[in-house]
Amino acid sequence: MIPTDNIFIERYQSGRPHEGKVLAAVQAHADDIPLFCSGTIAKLIDEGYTAYLIQTTNDEKCGPTASIGETIFQNEREVDELVKVLGFKGVYHLGYRNHRLDEASSQELRARLIFLFRALKVDTVFTFNPWGHGEENPDHIITAQAVEAARWMAGMGKDYPEHTAAGLTPHTVRDQYYWTVRYVQPYNRVVDISAYIEKKIDAMVVNKAQGPAGAAGSRLRKKLEAAGIRIPGFGENDETADREYVRLFGLCDFSDLAEKYELKYAEAFYYIPPGGTFIGTVDSEAVQKYIDENGMVQDKN
């Protein structure tokens, strides 16, 4: 992970300052949110956000079961459990084929996301970095680029007029958190998740079908017991072993990042604030401020 010149440290804010706002976290696979942003999502929900999870693929290639159907079902069930653990209000499974998302219509995927962003009135979106330095997973790249286009087009009045006819209105997604996946990707925002590390562990333990954590602890405990070795910290049950495994081995990148900024645990993002990325975009707040400071009320008589 490569820091930019100006790093903003985002910390917990009391008083639910984001009450009334909506966020959507868009992942390609069941382990993405637990790994890359679960602590931040938990924090923002505590601060007042209503959150929704959107998953683009069916995870058919990700899991220990021999049957594709069983693999899809296990991953979907774990995503549904993740929704409960972190406090999402709802989840949308789009169901495209895992590792073959490029076979789907890019226009269809974008249109479905635009519909959801408008229907849910999403203010903030979380996903992969659409410019994806060092990204090798095609599902990550396609998901990110679809989200980037959809969050922009969702605010356009002439795109998908059938939405307007059905009662939806154009809605602009105001800011973006692009989570950091590869070591060569840049970040400009570090979120202090120290108070939410147990929630992050909860999220990572839910994801047993894939990912670096999940059931790894219980599998290791059983393997060592068969060899006559016992690790006291792994306890006497699978749940304790899985949580301890995550704590010992699954959080190293997040503690290493945090140490650079005198924190305990942190997640990194490339954040784009309200206002978009266009050079020369007119800031409506600046216009209003100018009117307030310079406008003169004229006598109509």
Image (cartoon, grey):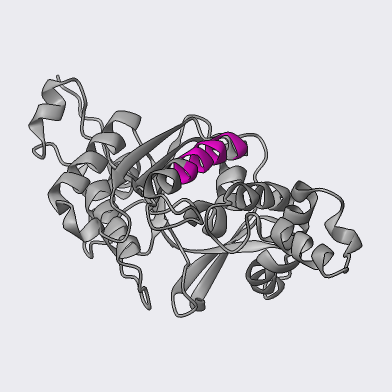
Residue at x 9% of width, y 31% of height = 161
Image quadrant in which the C terminus is located: top left
Question: Would you place residue 115 above or below residue 273 in this image?
Answer: above
Taking 90 as reference, is 12 left or right? right
Question: Would you place residue 213 above or below residue 112 in this image?
Answer: below
Q: Is residue 216 visible?
A: yes
- Quarter of the view holding residue 296: top left
Residue at x 10% of width, y 40% of height = 159
The rendered magenta stretch, by its main secondary structure, is classed as: helix
Q: Is residue 264 visible?
A: no
Q: How far across and how far down the image is residue 285, in percent?
A: 33, 45
Q: How far across and how far down the image is residue 267, in percent?
A: 58, 62
Please state the extent of the stretch shown in magenta in the rendering. 74-85
The total number of labels drawn is 0
Query: Along the line of sight, which residue is nearer the eye, 210 or 168?
Result: 210
Q: How far across and how far down the image is residue 94, in percent?
A: 30, 41
| Residue 80 lies in the magenta stretch | yes
| Residue 45 lies in the magenta stretch | no
Residue at x 52% of width, y 35% of height = 88
Taking 171 as reference, is 184 left or right? right
Residue at x 22% of width, y 40% of height = 112
